[in-house]
């Protein structure tokens, strides 16, 4: 029986099929009545009497056939669909209410009664405003989504998301509301905000601890290192004049320089410097950073690619600090490709923001390091301090931006710097002064001089300079 109803439901879904089936059944019944009429009607009956008997027989034959073949199956299909719909609505996890244009509840499922703490009998006919007092009058086009406060039977208020739409009908007077409880969602959001605040508080505590540590290091380590370096330089000059070997002294001096860089990294991380915000084109800063790394790219056989639009994209900030950020990311990428590869710097206009991507084809970032990538003292380098990326992120945040890093699908890693764009009508941001530290540009030039001096001391050629790609 169910298979026959299913087959009939497929046939009867089209109005033309129903019309064709009705015409076929009526035609067959009419032919049968015409053949049977001479045997059931007396010969003395008049023409009008025969017509009445013919119509009566046709009705008696067609009505049961139409009921059995068309009307009955359609009725059973309608009942089944109605029961299926009621089952789906009743067992739905979300609260479903139907109401008329006056706002009176017409029906509700089990989830709705549990949400509001009201039984079905009390729910029917109840105004929607008694359940959700802040629900505005629903006018205009539907569907619409609203965030309102609902009231439980015990008087407790809780947030809900309400989606209201029209129930398809000829009268167009019934509306359906799907109500979602937002209590758990808002609780989870509040917990997330609390965790974020705790994380920021922990970072602030780390910065304060590093500031104290850096101050002690600056007094207890930096000055003795300077004295030792000066003595080494003097004795190296004397040894050279007397023809004695100076290789060991040169190695000691290089190690002292490396220790000084570590001390400076601690100071840079713990103590932000003075920043002067000015409007500049991000492409110019990218090209200056590219100019500084081209020589090393050539010596490492790294293919350097730069993708940037010709039209200037302006941002507000300290160009020297942004250049240092990009230079640090590029140097990290080159450290990950000692045997060659590809380094791609791209400037992407995202409308409100501009993204600068530094993508390499190196070894990528290990999962262990990726989880705490920007945390202090986290590094994969044998001689690294683990503060470079933390300094980069601090610079990005100081420019109202964001710095993220992730592994590529194939190989290597990509770091994305996102900065807000400015237009001609925007005002330049004010200065941000953290303390009275030395100029970032001067410190960066000194670090580059040391970086270029190191390969020269070990017998390698200095990095040549050439035009950007």
Image: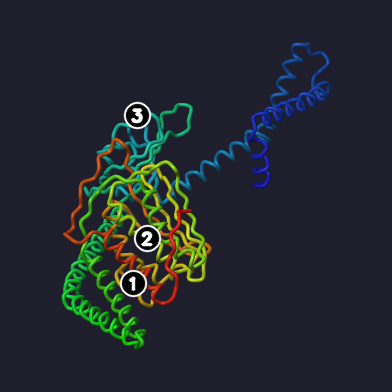
User: In the drawing, does residue 78 fall left or right of residue 457?
Assistant: right
Q: Nearer the viewer, mark 2 or mark 3?
A: 2
Q: How is the protein colored in the picture?
A: rainbow
The answer for how far apart the CA atoms under marks 1 and 3 are is 57 Å
Closer to the camera, 436 or 201?
436
Q: Where is residue 54 in the image (x, y as percent from the top left)?
A: 75, 19
Disc tally is 3
Q: Position of residue 429 (x, y in %)?
A: 23, 45
For marks 2 and 3 on the same chain, the one whose residue lies earlier in the sequence? 3
User: In the drawing, does residue 31 fall left or right of residue 269?
Assistant: right
Residue on which the image places disc 3: 139
> Above or below — where is 198 with respect to 424?
below
Q: Which of marks 1 and 3 is in front?
A: 1
Disc 3 element: loop
The answer for how far apart the CA atoms under marks 2 and 3 are is 57 Å
Callout 1 crowding tier (Cα within 10 Å): few <14, some 14–19, many ≥20: some
Residue on which the image places disc 2: 327
Closer to the camera, 132 or 229?
229
Q: Residue 73 lies in what quarter of the image?
A: top right
Asked whether the residues under the numbered discs 2 and 1 touch, taking CB atoms below 8 Å apart as contact, a structural biologist would say no
Callout 2 crowding tier (Cα within 10 Å): few <14, some 14–19, many ≥20: many
Tell me the residue at 33%/83% (across/down): 240
Residue on which the image places disc 1: 378
For marks 1 and 3 on the same chain, the one whose residue lies earlier in the sequence? 3
Callout 3 crowding tier (Cα within 10 Å): few <14, some 14–19, many ≥20: few
Q: Where is residue 394 in the image (x, y as percent from the top left)?
A: 28, 60
Tell me the residue at 47%/57% (across/down): 344
Disc 1 element: loop
Asked whether the residues under the numbered discs 2 and 3 touch, taking CB atoms below 8 Å apart as contact, a structural biologist would say no
Disc 2 element: helix
The answer for how far apart the CA atoms under marks 2 and 1 are is 19 Å
């Amino acid at each position: 029986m169910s298979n026959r109803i299913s087959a009939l439901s497929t046939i009867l879904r089209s109005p033309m099929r129903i019309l064709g089936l009705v015409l076929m059944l009526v035609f067959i019944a009419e032919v049968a009545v015409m053949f049977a009429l001479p045997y059931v009607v007396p010969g003395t009956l008049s023409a009008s009497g025969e017509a009445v008997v013919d119509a009566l027989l046709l009705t008696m034959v067609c009505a049961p056939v139409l009921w059995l073949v068309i009307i009955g199956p359609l009725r059973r299909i309608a009942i089944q669909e109605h029961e299926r719909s009621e089952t789906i609505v009743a067992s739905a996890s979300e609260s479903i209410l139907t109401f008329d244009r006056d706002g009176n509840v017409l029906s509700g499922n089990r989830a709705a009664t549990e949400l509001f703490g009201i039984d079905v009998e009390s729910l029917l006919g109840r105004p929607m405003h008694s359940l959700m007092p802040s629900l505005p009058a629903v006018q205009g086009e539907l569907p619409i989504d609203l965030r309102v406060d609902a009231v439980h039977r015990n008087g407790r208020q809780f947030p809900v998301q309400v989606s209201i739409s029209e129930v398809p009908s000829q009268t167009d007077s019934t509306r359906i509301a799907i109500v979602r409880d937002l209590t758990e969602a808002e609780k989870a959001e509040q917990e997330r905000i609390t965790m974020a605040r705790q994380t920021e508080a922990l970072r602030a505590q780390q910065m304060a601890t590093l500031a104290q540590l850096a101050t002690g290091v600056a007094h207890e380590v930096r000055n003795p290192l300077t004295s030792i370096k000066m003595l080494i330089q003097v004795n190296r000059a004397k040894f050279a004049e007397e023809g004695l070997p100076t290789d060991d002294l040169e190695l000691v001096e290089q190690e002292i320089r490396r220790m000084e860089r570590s001390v400076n990294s601690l100071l840079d991380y713990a103590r932000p410097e003075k920043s002067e915000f000015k409007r500049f084109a991000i492409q110019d800063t990218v090209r200056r950073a590219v100019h500084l790394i081209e020589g090393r790219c050539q010596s490492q056989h790294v293919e350097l690619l730069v993708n940037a639009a010709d039209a200037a994209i302006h941002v507000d900030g300290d160009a020297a600090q942004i250049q240092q950020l990009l230079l640090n990311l590029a140097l990290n990428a080159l450290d990950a490709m000692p045997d060659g590869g590809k380094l791609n710097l791209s400037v992407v206009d995202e409308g409100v923001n501009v993204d600068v991507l530094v993508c390499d084809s190196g070894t990528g970032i290990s999962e262990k390091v990726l989880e705490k990538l920007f945390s202090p003292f986290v590094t994969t380098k044998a001689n690294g301090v683990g503060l470079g990326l933390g300094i980069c992120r601090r610079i990005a945040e100081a420019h109202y931006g964001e710095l993220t890093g992730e592994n590529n699908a194939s190989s290597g890693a990509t770091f994305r710097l996102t900065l807000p764009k400015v237009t001609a009508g925007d005002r330049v941001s004010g200065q941000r002064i953290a303390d009275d530290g030395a100029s970032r540009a001067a410190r960066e030039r000194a670090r580059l001089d040391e970086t270029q001096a190191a390969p020269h001391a070990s017998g390698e050629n200095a990095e040549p300079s050439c035009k950007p790609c």
